Image (cartoon, grey):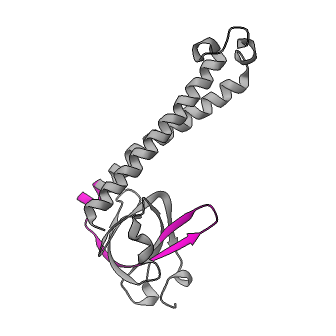
Amino acid sequence: MSRQTDIAILRRYSTFAWSASLLVAFFGAASLLLFVRPSLVGVQPGSGGIYQGNPMWLFFGAVLVILGMVFQVTAYRWPRRLLRVLRTERPNSMRLQVEVEESSDSTQYYALVFEDMLPSKRKGWRVGLWAPSDGTRDLASRDLSAMVYFDPQTGNPAVIEHGDGYLWAMKGAVTPLREQTLPGGL
């Protein structure tokens, strides 16, 4: 994969997440309309009493609108932040290993990044990956060199550049590794 392809995949995931959050907010607004005035949503006047004034629709609508707005902000800002970190920050040379966790309903990718130092002094992170490209699975179980761009606000890895492209950190899915869990037989 090329670096431009990885950036395009990130933008595609962002657009999909933004669209899904817009849909959630839309259903929340429809639920609020059911609470206030069901006829605006197409409910027949005789059936409107079931919906109008029912606090369940108010609660359900408010929760969906709030979740939709939160996801809107996240889906809009996080990819732009990753690209800004890539453009403005200086990378650090580190080691990279990719883990693949498969379950019956999903596959999750994690990057283990750790400093190129003596094993007793290493510092590392386990990074949940967002918008993985098709070639991410091929990186599993290999020890690679990588350039890691750190988010200046959190101090955590945000973008991992390896030989074939980029890996993007999922927001809030970065955990520091203790020395006992670092790769390399510590």
Residue at the far right in the pictured view: 50
The one nearer the camera, 50 or 89, is: 50
Q: Does residue 84 appear left or right of residue 112 in this picture?
A: left
154 shown above or below 57: below
Residue at the far top in the pictured view: 45
The one nearer the camera, 164 or 152, is: 164
The one nearer the camera, 118 or 50, is: 50
State the image quarter where residue 118 is shown: bottom left
- Asked if one can make out residue 46 in the rendered structure from this viewpoint, the answer is yes
Residue visible at 49% across and 68% down in the picture: 109
Q: Quadrant of the N terminus?
A: bottom left
54 shown above or below 92: above
84 shown above or below 121: above
- Asked if one can make out residue 69 in the rendered structure from this viewpoint, the answer is no
Q: Position of residue 115 (x, y in %)?
A: 38, 80
Q: Is residue 40 magenta?
A: no
Residue visible at 59% across and 34% down in the picture: 64
State the image quarter where residue 33 is shown: top right
Residue visible at 49% across and 84% down in the picture: 183
Q: Does residue 98 appear left or right of residue 58 in this picture?
A: left
Q: Position of residue 93 (x, y in %)?
A: 30, 77
Q: Position of residue 50 (x, y in %)?
A: 75, 17
Give, as a single range, the part of the protein colored magenta.
Answer: 84-110
95 shown above or below 184: above
Q: Is residue 85 magenta?
A: yes
